[in-house]
Image (tube, helix red, strand yellow):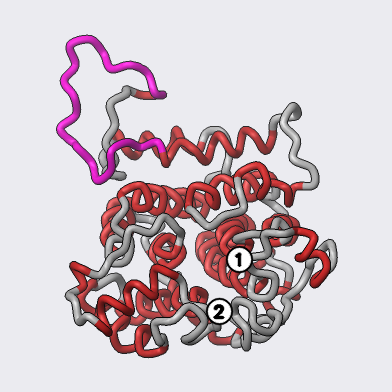
Amino acid sequence: MNQTQDRAQGALVGALIGEALGVGPHWFYDLNELHHHYGTWIDDYTDPLKDRYHDGVKAGELSQQGWIILETARFLSHHHGYDEEAYFRMMDELILPELDGTPMGGKGGYTSQVMRHLYQKRIIEKQPWSQASSHSDTTESLERNIPLGIFFSNDFKALTTTIASNTKLTQHDDVVGSLSVAFNCVLAMLIQGHPLDEKLSMKLMEKVHAHDIPFHAVTSDNLQAPKKGEQASSQSGLFASPDALLSPSYMALASQDPDIRIEPAWKVSLVYGMPCAIYHMLPAAYYLAARFSNDFESGVLHALNGGGQNQVRAMLTGALIGAQVGLSHIPSRFIEKLKDKEDILKVAHALTQHL
């Protein structure tokens, strides 16, 4: 396994570790209640409480979204890429039959609003896939697309167009699409070996100007004004602006600025917000992944202990730090306690062999 493959596998396994860590203490918005049930510092997989989210899932198991991520990764390795019609069939034949359309039913103990809407449209109303997406502002599509970000991490044109298309299968908000694509562009850069620092966003902007990432951009290099008399680019782009690509470096700067301190780091959830919307999740994940770029355990556990939508926060942080440290530097205790670890590692290996 070369270093790129190590980082790519670290991204997938890191995301799934974060997802599984969040199964027990998911969605406690009252931190006193969280501490009452799980103590003031959660450092391992835990069981969910009875009658709460993911009831019935055991410590170390993936919940529904983790399962969908894993099956998407398996799909990509089996098909040696992304075929949308085949992906439709996979969702219709493998994923949706395991749901029942209710919040607390279906595989994994909880079904998100996005997946409930999809179930309603495809199973109940028999609508075509072109009519199945919702207007949700949460992160389900971004999470599902982590394997695509990994698989296409050496081809930004394919990454951008494929993830934009796949996102619209279930969420049609352009801001969600833009942020989802941007996250996976960042993930791809980390897999290639670039640091999550103040320079990363400008590297991504260079790819925009080179037409490798089809975002609309008006500014010239280094965000300077266009030259007088210069015609606007004919590249309109998939999204209105590339601002989603600029955010990560600001979070990285904040994490290293001695005048900006979030202590303890888990309180990043209070700074950027505990709710589920994508614009709360991404800044916190970028901040933690930059601050703990070489420390998978600290970064993921601070993401977990922040409460609220801590499962997604830990998942996204786990993917970003896993892509920086590589599978070989994720503490073995997190891997060993994952249920079906052999299958997860096998899928991670198959997904990354072309890199």
Quick one: label 1, few (<14), some, or many (20+) residues within 10 Å? many
The residue shown at (42%, 80%) is: 71
Question: Of the residues shown, which amino acid type is indicated by label 1?
Answer: Gln
- The quarter of the picture where the N terminus appears is bottom right
Is there any visible trace of residue 225 in the rendered image?
Answer: yes
Q: Is residue 81 left or right of residue 113?
A: left
Please name whichever residue, 236 or 227, is drawn nearer the observer in this view of the structure: 236
Residue beneath disc 2: 63
Number of marks: 2
Q: In which quarter of the image is residue 89?
A: bottom left
The residue shown at (69%, 70%) is: 25
Is there any visible trace of residue 327 in the rendered image?
Answer: no
Question: Of the residues shown, which amino acid type is indicated by label 2?
Answer: Ser
- Check residue 309 for magenta coloring: no
Q: What element carries label 1?
A: helix
Q: Main secondary structure of the magenta part?
A: loop
- Considering only vertical position in the picture, is 248 above or below 128? above
Q: Is residue 315 left or right of residue 211?
A: right
Q: Which of marks 1 and 2 is nearer the N terminus?
A: 2
Q: Position of residue 295 (x, y in %)?
A: 72, 55
The span from disc 1 to disc 2 (Cα, nearest Å) is 10 Å
Q: What element carries label 2?
A: loop
Magenta stretch: give its range. 222-243
Please name whichever residue, 327 or 100, is drawn nearer the observer in this view of the structure: 100
Residue beneath disc 1: 311
- Tell me whether the residue at label 1 lies in contact with that at label 2, contact meaning CB atoms closer than 8 angstroms: yes
Q: In this view, does 42 lie to the left or right of 173?
A: right
- Considering only vertical position in the picture, is 238 above or below 336? above
Q: Where is residue 126 in the image (x, y as percent from the top left)?
A: 20, 82
